[in-house]
Image: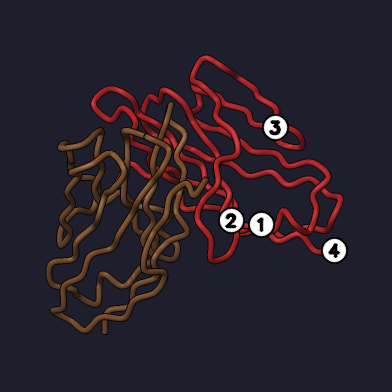
């Protein structure tokens, strides 16, 4: 039982590059979300989805896009990477309010 | 920001001692949860307490919730070196925020053998 799988684990980008962080869950959860974690800031919600075809913005959505074509997958796209997007990104799926987190993607933007 | 406030930011204790972490929030909530994060890992759910509950236990964990003071505490009894981690509170504000969790900044707990 894999739970929530995030790829890649590490990524280095140059300013202006684009990339997609992958997230997949095998628990058939309807609710999925993306967070970023910065030192001293806890986790901040970027985007979330309550089911396939439905997404909405969280607290810090600027510079990120999401889509949810299937229940299992919820990719996060960085359109034009900026140094301010250097962070650790976590994907989570949720059932009955309890969130199950992936292991994270550590992203550095130079 | 609707983030919760946690204190202390860091806590260092000896094995066998109890550890208490506190969380305060500003909105009405449906429930409050505590999560644990080991270094370099994702968060793991520990316990959930609903707004109509005052206290909940799970093994060596005890959580209290005071909705009148908008605060919660997590007590870890008889701590072990393996409890060393960051601990986060997270709350569900309900209403249009249903299902969305707002996290505190976390408490870094170090338990010395």
**Element type where label 2 sits in the image:** strand
Left/right placement of residue A106 relative to residue B38 reads: left
Q: Residue furthest front?
A: A1
Disc 2: which chain? B
What kind of element bears circle 3? Answer: strand
Name which of mark 3 and mark 2 comes first in the sequence: 3
Mark 4 on the same chain as mark 3: yes
User: Which chain identifier belongs to the red chain?
Assistant: B
Q: Tell me the element at label 4.
A: loop
| Residue at (23, 45) in percent of width and height | A58
Instruction: Evaluate if marks 1 and 2 touch, with contact meaning CB atoms under 8 Å apart.
Output: yes
Task: Report, in whole angstroms, how far the alpha carbon at label 4 lies from the one at label 3.
Answer: 22 Å
**Mark 3 surroundings within 10 Å by alpha-carbon count, few (fewer than 14), some (14 through 19), many (20 or more):** some
Residue A18: horizontal and vertical position, in percent?
16, 72
Mark 4 falls within which chain?
A: B
Precedes in sequence: disc 1 or disc 2: 2
**Tag 1's secondary structure?**
strand
Left/right of residue B84 with respect to residue B102 in the rendered view: right
Assess disc 1: are there few (<14), some (14-19) or many (≥20) residues with their C-alpha within 10 Å of its C-alpha: many
Count of all numbered marks drawn on residues in the image: 4
Q: Which residue is mark 1?
A: B109
- Between disc 3 and disc 1, whose residue precedes? 3
Residue drawn at x 43%, y 49% is: A4
């Amino acid at each position: 039982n894999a739970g929530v799988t995030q790829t890649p684990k590490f990524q280095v980008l140059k300013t202006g590059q684009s990339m997609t962080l992958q997230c997949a869950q095998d628990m058939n959860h309807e609710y999925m979300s993306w967070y970023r974690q910065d030192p001293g800031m806890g986790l901040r919600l970027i985007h979330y989805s309550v089911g396939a075809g439905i997404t909405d913005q969280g607290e810090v959505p600027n510079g990120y896009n999401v889509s949810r074509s299937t229940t299992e997958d919820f990719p996060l796209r960085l359109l034009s990477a900026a140094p301010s997007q250097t962070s650790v990104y976590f994907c989570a799926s949720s059932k009955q309010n309890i969130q199950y987190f992936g292991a994270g993607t550590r992203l550095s933007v130079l | 920001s609707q983030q919760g406030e946690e204190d202390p930011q860091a806590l260092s204790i000896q094995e066998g001692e109890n550890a208490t972490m506190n969380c305060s929030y500003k909105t009405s909530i449906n429930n409050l949860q505590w999560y644990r994060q080991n270094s370099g890992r994702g968060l793991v759910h520990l316990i959930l307490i609903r707004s109509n509950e005052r206290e909940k236990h799970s093994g060596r964990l005890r959580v209290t919730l005071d909705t009148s003071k908008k605060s919660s505490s997590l007590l870890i009894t008889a701590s072990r070196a393996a409890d060393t981690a960051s601990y986060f509170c997270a709350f569900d504000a309900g209403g249009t925020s249903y299902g969305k969790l707002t996290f505190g900044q976390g408490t870094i707990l170090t338990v010395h053998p």
